[in-house]
Image (cartoon, grey):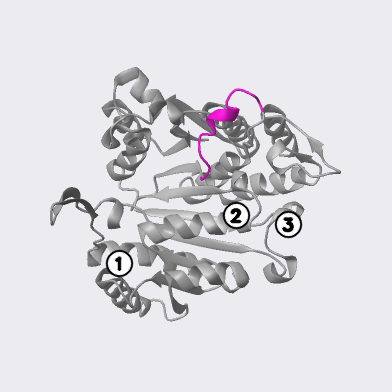
């Protein structure tokens, strides 16, 4: 029997509630598939600021480095809006990504059949199904580049620098090509090579790496065109690879096509098998403690953890199938539709466990 060590970063707002349901489902899955999970908790975000004065304590980093994987709830909230930029809850999130070397962010945009009617995109545009994997570079680009403030002609000014090295582009490209090989062998690289020098290097490097994957069809789109194509013809995409800032924007756009931001999971991977898994939605402090938060994105993040870090694809499939089954009849308030039964956060977790 294999034992896995998982660190829980429950975070702020609804974070603890949704992580608790994901743990419940992971325990049930472990029982079903004959493995065990040992948990350790650590602080990240606003709760860490309250307890230690900083959003990412050293103890949290050390615990995460020793774990097989990390499950995160959500961070942030208006309580910490007056913190300086380098001490906001979100700075802890950027910090843990850098500390663990989490350079590849995987964001699937998938429509579960029972939720197809919730998409703002017409059925005839979506087609039979929607299954896009967006691969976002996570530790380079403008979010981590040189930044500052100065005066220009006597006026206050600010700057942020977009920069990528060839090795950074190569490693994220290989992640995307490897995923495409396991899917429909189609990769779209998104940049702004008509304007940005960093994008021109990006495109040159991706084209060179493509020679290692002759079976994969490689296409290129400018980011503005890609944003449009996601709305008018999303089914054309299989895997999309792009930079940190473009991926941040496009993955949120794709998430809304799928019907609800409360349904979408994500994985952030290092060069090894370890990773950090989290829902893409925020901490929703306005509904924290009300028992109405949707835990499914966090539960589906556990499925991604089983698939990409723990090598348990059958267990991952079981969770995803359980979610699809439950959604036919039961919904949390954010995805409620007439004819289904409205359930609480805890009840949704129990239903997934029963379906397993």
- Distance, label 3 to label 1, CA atoms, is 36 Å
**Residue on which the image places disc 2:** 256
- Which residue occupies 75% across, 45% down? 327
> Could you classify mark 2 by the number of other residues whose Cα lies within 10 Å: few (under 14), some (14-19), or many (20 or more)?
some
Give x and y (percent) for residue 163: 24, 61
- Distance, label 3 to label 2, CA atoms, is 12 Å
Look at the image and tell me whether residue 311 can be seen: no
Which mark is nearer the camera, 3 or 2? 2
Q: Secondary structure at mark 1?
A: helix
Magenta residues? Answer: 280-291
**Residue on which the image places disc 3:** 116
Which circle marks residue 170 in the picture? 1
Total of numbered circles in the picture? 3
Give x and y (percent) for residue 322: 71, 44
Q: Identify the image quadrant of the C terminus.
A: top right
| N-terminal label among 3 and 1 | 3
| N-terminal label among 3 and 2 | 3
- Which residue occupies 59% across, 74% down? 236
Give x and y (percent) for residue 123: 74, 66
């Amino acid at each position: 029997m294999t034992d896995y060590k998982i660190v829980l970063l429950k975070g702020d707002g609804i974070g603890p509630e949704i992580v608790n349901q994901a743990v419940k489902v992971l325990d049930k899955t472990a029982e079903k598939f004959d493995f065990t999970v040992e948990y350790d908790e650590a602080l990240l975000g606003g709760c860490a600021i309250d307890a230690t004065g900083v959003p990412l304590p050293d103890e949290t980093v050390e615990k995460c480095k020793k774990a097989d994987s990390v499950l995160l709830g959500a961070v942030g909230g208006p309580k910490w809006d007056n913190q300086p930029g380098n001490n906001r809850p979100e700075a802890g999130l950027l910090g843990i990504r850098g500390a663990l070397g989490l350079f590849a962010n995987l964001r699937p945009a998938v429509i579960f059949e029972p939720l197809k009617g919730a998409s703002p995109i017409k059925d005839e545009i979506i087609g039979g199904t929607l299954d896009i994997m967006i691969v976002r570079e996570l530790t380079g680009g403008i979010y981590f580049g040189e930044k500052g403030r100065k005066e220009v002609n006597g006026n206050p000014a600010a700057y942020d620098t977009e920069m990528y090295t060839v090795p950074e582009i190569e490693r994220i490209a290989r992640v995307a090509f490897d995923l495409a090989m396991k899917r429909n062998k189609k990769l779209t690289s998104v940049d702004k090579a008509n304007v940005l020098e960093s994008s021109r290097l990006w495109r040159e490097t991706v084209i060179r790496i493509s020679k290692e994957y002759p079976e994969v069809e490689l296409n290129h789109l400018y980011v503005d065109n890609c944003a449009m194509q996601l709305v008018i013809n999303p089914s054309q995409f299989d895997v999309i690879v792009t930079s940190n800032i473009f991926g941040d924007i496009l993955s949120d756009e794709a998430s809304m096509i799928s019907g609800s931001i409360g349904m979408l999971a994500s994985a952030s991977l290092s060069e090894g098998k370890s990773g950090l898994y989290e829902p893409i939605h925020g901490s929703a402090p306005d509904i924290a403690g009300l028992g109405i938060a949707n835990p499914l994105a966090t539960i589906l993040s556990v499925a991604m953890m089983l698939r990409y870090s723990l090598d348990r694809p059958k267990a991952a499939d079981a969770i995803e199938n359980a979610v699809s089954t439950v959604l036919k009849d039961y919904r949390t308030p954010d995805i409620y539709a007439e004819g289904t039964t409205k359930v609480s956060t805890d009840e949704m977790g129990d239903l997934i466990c029963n379906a397993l």
